[in-house]
Image: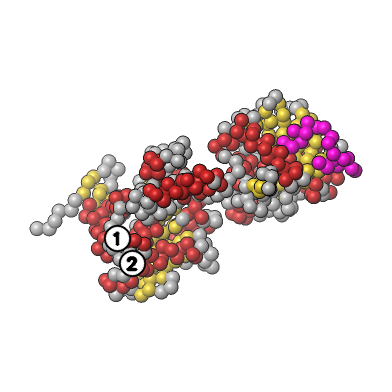
Amino acid sequence: MAKKQKTVSSVEGFTFDADAADRAVAFFAECLTHTTGEWRGQPFILSDWQADIVRKIFGWKRPDGTRRYRTVFIAVPRKAGKTTLAAGLALYALYCDGEPGAQVINAAADREQAALCFEAAKGMVQAEPALESRSTAYKRSIIVPSTGSSYKVLSSEAYSKHGLSCSYIGADELHAWPDRELWDVLTTSTGARRQPLTVVTTTAGYDRHSICYEQWDYAIKVRDGIIEDPSFLPCIFAADVDDDWQDPAVWHKAHPGLGVSVKLEYMQAECAKAQALPSYENTFRRLLLNQWTESDVRWLSMDAWDKCGTELPELEGRVCYAALDLSTTTDISALVLAFPIGGTVHLLPFFFVPADGAEKRARKDRVPYPAWIKQGHIEATQGNVIDYEVIRARINELAERYQIREIAIDRWNATQLSTQLSGDGFEIVGFGQGFASMAGPCQDLERRVLGQTINHGNNPVLRWMASNVTTEQDAAGNLKPSKKRSTERIDGIVATLMSLGRVAANHEDQGISMTGFTFV
């Protein structure tokens, strides 16, 4: 008598095929071996968390017998075993999925990263005679002639990604992908497949405008029942935002491989390093606790920054100190007005970009310039370069509403615009970008953010720039923002620091006046 198929019905109308789930788990143990590390040569016995994911992927079925899940989002910390799991899943899709002419793709941001998963998979194939005899392995592909199936490596650096018909997509370390182009090309290539599967394996990142954060946020909303998507399987192992990153209980909560793939002693050592080196804290939290952070080396805490955003008060007729950071004519320029009211400084920022090529710059900077333009957070000037006449007109318009006492400008960027503004009657202050000029404003901004005596009005462009800033330090411990080391644009924060410097100077002439300029 044939064995009765084990199924469990769900309220969603799907069924769980336990035999199919068991077959997938058994494939790992019976056909695959570890190729590196202390388990080299041993059968690939899935950890509990890995087996649970595999069973869900291949066990849950639709009424027509195809897989329920079409996208699986697996977010786990580093050293949890996600690379070997991804390699095994790709091989199961290649050999056991019953897909004619299966096209299995392993994709990553660059060739080196993409090769990591592929090399693990190739090593597993070469270690198993039953798989190797059916396959032809090349440098960047594995071919199964009997089924016309292939497993190939692809990266965002690849010269061409079109003409694909993917049955399985393994998206590795999605947080590192420079833009969404590769993601869109791959995911839209699955339309001809009966039951395509996309598996994302990633750690957390710091770019909240990336495709990874978009998918991460979507996964959380599906997990929490905010979005109903029965085809999407979220598998997120991470510390919560408010968790104490120094607490070993949090480590166990966030890291499913703790005690197995990564030792407790290692976590203790890495945590001690993060405690001793503040610049390493974000790295520890992001890679080993899977928490999204602002940047690899941060200056400002975004948690503290976010607490400083409230609705701006009525500013009409108020005294303010302006600062203008003029970037190249093809990048973003920032104007910030700082209003000292009581013990708080209120910031009113303005940003300018060329209208032409906004989409291209959005992909380059990985931020939604077009959306920000539409929302009024950025002003787009006509053409492919910033029209400084528009900035000049905007400043003169603002002067009709506010008492602009000074306009601080980089002393080495005293362009024609500076001369024109001086001719318009504004007091132009040359403001250096070195330690001598920036150290005081940096200290002031830090103090105000921590003490919540600055109000940025929750401007999203300024927040993005605040999250990008890294600093340089001289031998005396003075700080200045570093455009070279910062992750992305920081023009708005530079302008903020310059305006705070003039607020601190309290409009007292402390330098030498020369042809309308005051140099400090």
Earlier-in-chain disc, 1 versus 2: 1
Residue at screen point 38% across, 48% down: 264
- Distance in Å between CA atoms under marks 1 and 2: 10 Å
The answer to whether the residues at label 1 and label 2 have Cβ atoms under 8 Å apart is yes
Residue at screen point 72% across, 42% down: 438
Mark 1 lies on residue = 44
482 shown above or below 98? above
Residue at the far top in the pictured view? 342
The residue segment tinted magenta is 500-520
Mark 2 lies on residue = 124
Q: Is residue 185 magenta?
A: no
Q: Position of residue 272 (x, y in %)?
A: 47, 45
Q: Which quadrant of the figure contains the C terminus?
A: top right
Residue 396 visible in the snapshot: yes
Q: Mark 2, residues whose alpha carbon is within 10 Å: few (<14), some, or many (≥20)? A: many
Could you say whether the residue bearing mark 1 is in a helix, strand or loop?
A: loop
Front residue of this view, candidates 286 and 74 = 286
Q: Which quadrant of the figure contains the N terminus?
A: bottom left
Tell me which amino acid carries mark 2: Met
Residue at the far left in the pictured view? 1
Could you say whether the residue bearing mark 2 is in a helix, strand or loop?
A: helix
Front residue of this view, candidates 386 and 298 = 298
Front residue of this view, candidates 177 and 474 = 474
285 shown above or below 26? above
> Is residue 243 left or right of 39 when viewed as pictured?
right
Tell me which amino acid carries mark 1: Phe
